Structure formats: structure tokens, C-alpha cells
Amino acid sequence: MRPGAENRPADDGFTLVEVIVALALMSLVASAALYFFLSGTRTITHQQRTQNAVVVANDAMEAAYGVVAQPVDDVSGLLVGRSEAAVQSAWTTGAAAGVEGIALTYPAWDPAGTGNGTLPITSQQTLNNVDYDVLTLVGHCYRPTSTNAECATVPGNLTDPATVPAGYTRMLRVMVLISWDSVQSPCGDTACSYQVTSLIDPNTDLEWNNTTRPIAVDDVAVVEVGQAVTVDVVRNDVIGVVVSNPVRNVTVTGGTGTATLQSDGQVRFQAPTNASGIMTFTYMLKDAAGRESNTATVRVSVMPRAVDDTATTNRGTAVTIPVTTNDQGSPASVQIITPPAFGTVTVSGTSVVFDPQGQMGSPSFEYQFTDGSGLVSTTARVRLTVTAYAAPLAVDLTVGIAATAAGTTAPIDWVTLTGNPGDYIIEVMSSDITQGKLKVNGNDYNATTNRRGTQLAYAQQGNVLGYWTVQYRVWTPDGSVSSDIKTMRIILVPTPVNDSVQVKTGTTNNAINVGSNDAPNNFNGTVQFRPAATSTLAANCGSLPTTQPDLQNGIFRYNAPTLPNGTNSRTCTFTYVIQGTGQHTNLVSTPATVTIRVGR
């Protein structure tokens, strides 16, 4: 026995090495279990996300099925709004992702498209906190009509044929690619994806692609007042097979325009020439099966039109310009767009007041007007001519002045007679007045010291008749411009006055002094009496004796009638005129009336 062996304790339990080995084995078992657990979790997650991708793909395909595939203006509803650039970019993405069928399909777009399209090319949908990117590709493929071959590109055509080749039918292939984040997924370093593809026949002769009932969709149009616009109302409508014009019941429901249905299904709207605003008409559709649509409304904006104007004034006078008088539309308010180079413009209702503020020249300003619907007109220009003063006017005149017995001063309204402004000046060039006085600004005319003024009058001598001639011209207030010389003929005409007298019944040779208040009243020289051409006494009103010895004194003789019993009075009348004598026999007054009251 070795020394000390008897003191060694007996072996009991695991050694350290055994413990380490056991722990290592347990760790391996746990790691394997964790791996299988995590792997199973990832698999379940991937399956869930794939199922969600299927849902998203089906939604995208259903969205494509919900769009009317038949072409409108040679563009399928599936392509409306899709720009060429957006489609080509998406096509490159789809090809890189290996989208099924893309190599057999021509990319297609809307020539008028500007973006992502009505059926979006790209979109995103979130399910269970996972973002799914949706790429919807739509293109053309061609299927032979004589065989049951696959829909593909046309042999020998690298680009989409402009027209369908003979022996082929054009179809639409819709390819939907769904992709989502592949972190910790079986998809590796790339995004996971799911795709689905379907063919859609856009041909209108397929019964299964028709809508069950036409749908008329509201439209809008714009036209200038007085003009016409043709509205393709069916363009945005949904309708199946038709064998004739499908548009029905075109009716104007607002405004004063007219709507006329054309043979091709379009509607020609003629706007009124004198009104603007929002006008409407309605229509319906009817397909080959006799099914009628809802009523759609077409809202037409009839745009007002402003028309250029001109105006003339002088530098000291503001002028009101009725700018909207010649405009087309329904003006409610006026707006100044560009002011004139000088002066001021102020809106007054639907007119504009221009004040040149003492300046001269040819300024202009621009304006628009707004109608009651809020539509704004085109812009019109008002061209102005501002002079120092308007050219003075002068015309040959005949001025009649009523004669008076005592002689009075009668103003001559030369401003109104010539059409000049009130501040213009008249200049008397010559006068042959020999009886009475010509007055300029209240003073006697004098060819040297008093020939210009703003007021003109004739002061009668009294109890005379005559013709006189005055030569005159008109000046602007500043004396810078004058008119031509014209003639003013002043005529002093006889003026009788109506009379009223009373006489007794049955009396004869009654003297009625009618001339005392007439002018002139010198009946023995300047003027004479004569009965008016229409003067007659009624049969029961007595008579005027044939011999009238006192006419030179202004007296008529009158025989009164005898009133019958029971008649207390009777009113009788006759008329007369005063006529000049000698060289003035052509001066005849208007008739005067003598009223005689015959009583007891």
C-alpha cells in the first residue's frame, strides 16, 4: 500500500469532466430545439404573409376586372391616365422581377396620360402591419383566331401593332406582382413576391363583357357666349352593345341655350348671344337591349366676352363710359385690370368713369366683368382720346323771337342750338340789326370792344317786326380753336294773345278790342288782322259783319245771337291771326282765340 492511501476519501457522484460533458450535451439539445422552433415560426410567418399577398393580389385583379375594358377613343378603360414613362419604368421593374407573361406582352399606355392611371400602376396595401407593394401591369397580346394558341406578341413585330393584324384578336393581359419585406424570411436576401396573371377581352361584341344597364355620367363643357360646343357625352359613360345612337331625351334644364342631338351621339350646345353663366342640359342612354340609363347632367360654363370700347373727352371733363353696353354676357360687376397711363378710372355699377385730371393724350385701360354665376369675361381695352377741348360747333340758325309791344330782352340759347358745352364762347362777327339791340354778356354788341361772350340776347325796340342777320363763330374756352363762321337769322314774329269778353244776347255791332294786348299793336301800319283759315262761328253763335271798319284800331265788330227762352248764356269762339305788312307779309302769327260769353 502506498503511503497515505489509507487517508483518501472514497469516490462519490460525477467528476468535473463528466459535468462539463453533460452540460455540453444539454446545450446542443436545447440549441437544436430552439432552431426547430424558430424555423417553424419563420415558416408560419411566411405562410401568413404569403396568404395576405394572395389577398392583395386578388384585390388588385378584382380592381382590374371592375374597370370597363372596352376602348374609348382607342384607349381601354384599363389604360386611362397611364403615361408612357410610368408604364415603361414599371415594365422594366416587372421584367427584372420575372413577371410571368411579360415577355409575351407589349406594354400599353394612354397617349394622353400624365401619371399613374385610373387603375394605378403602383400602389401599396398594408395587412397585419406588413406593407405590400402592388405592381399592376397591363399590356396587349394577340391570339390567333384560327387556332387555340397562346396570347402572345406577333411574330416579327417588336412593338405593338397600331392596328390589329389580320387573323388575330387583341386582348389585354393583366399581370399583378405583389412584393413585401423579406427580413428573416425564407426568401433570402431579396423581397418576397407573389404574382397572378389574367387575360381580359376588351372587344365589345362579347356578351359576358357588357354591363347589365347603361350608366350615364355627368359631363362638363366650356363655351364662349354666342358660340357652340359639341359635347361627346357618351365618352365617359358605361354602355354595352348599341346598334344606333344611344343618346335620348336631351333637354335644356338651365339657361337659355339650345341643345341639339347629333346623329353620332354627340350633343351640340348653342350658347345664347346675350347671356352668360352656368347652363345645363340632361340626357339618357338606351342600349340595344332597350335598357335605359339614369339621367345625366351636362354643366356648360358659358363664358362672357368683353368688347373693346372708345371714348373721347377734353382734359377738364370726366366722362362716363358704359363699357358693358356692347359686351356679350350678363355683367354683374366690373373690374379694372390695367389702369390708364394718366387720370383715374372709377367703377360705377357696370360703367366706368374716366377723369383725365387736366392731362391730354391717348391713354387706355383694360377691364373685365364678372357675371352673376361668378364667371369672368375676357379682357377688353378702352381707348381714350383726351383733347384740350372738344372742337367747337357752329351751324346756320334761324331764331324766332316773339314780338312785344313795349319791347323786352329775349335770351338766345345759342349753346343748346349749336350743341356746344356751356363754357364755350360765341363771337359776333357782324350784325345788320337796325331796330333793337344785340346784347353780348348783357351789354350792347360792339364790333370793337364787346363782341365775345358766353351769353347772347336780343333787346326789342317794341312794336316792330323784322329780319336780321348775325354772322358768328364759336371758340373753345381757352380761345385756342374756333369754328367756321356761320349765319344766325333772327326773326321778330307777331304775337297775338287770346281774349275773353261778355256781350248781351241779341245785340249787334259789339266792339271787341282784341288788339290791345297783341304785339305789334299798330294795326294801321306794321301789322293787320285777318281771320284764321279755320275760323268759323257756330250757327247759333251770331256773326262777324262783313264790313269791319275798326280793324286798324285792333277792334272786331260782332253781332250776338238771340238766346231762346230758358237759355241764360252761350259760349262762342272765333280765331284770328296777325300778319305783317309790306315786306313782312310772310310773317304770320299763330292763331289766337277770342272767347265770347253771350248772356242776358
Image (cartoon, helix red, strand yellow):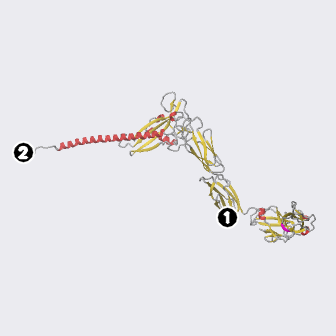
Q: Position of residue 288 (x, y in %)?
A: 56, 35
Q: Is residue 410 above or below residue 147?
A: below
Whether residue 207 appears in this view of the structure is yes
Q: Is residue 330 above or below residue 163?
A: below
Specify the farthest residue to the front: 565
Whether residue 518 appears in this view of the structure is no
- Using residue 309 as the reference point, say whether residue 524 is left or right of it: right
Question: Amino acid type of disc 1?
Answer: Gln
**Residue topped by disc 2:** 6
Q: Which residues are magenta?
A: 497-502
**Quarter of the image where the N terminus is located:** top left
Q: Mark 1: which secondary structure?
A: loop
**Residue topped by disc 1:** 357
Question: Amino acid type of disc 2?
Answer: Glu
Asked where in the image residue 452 lies, by quadrant, the reply is bottom right
Residue visible at 13% across and 44% down in the picture? 12
How crowded pointer 2 is (Cα within 10 Å; few <14, some 14-19, many 20+) is rated as few
Asked where in the image residue 459 lies, by quadrant, the reply is bottom right
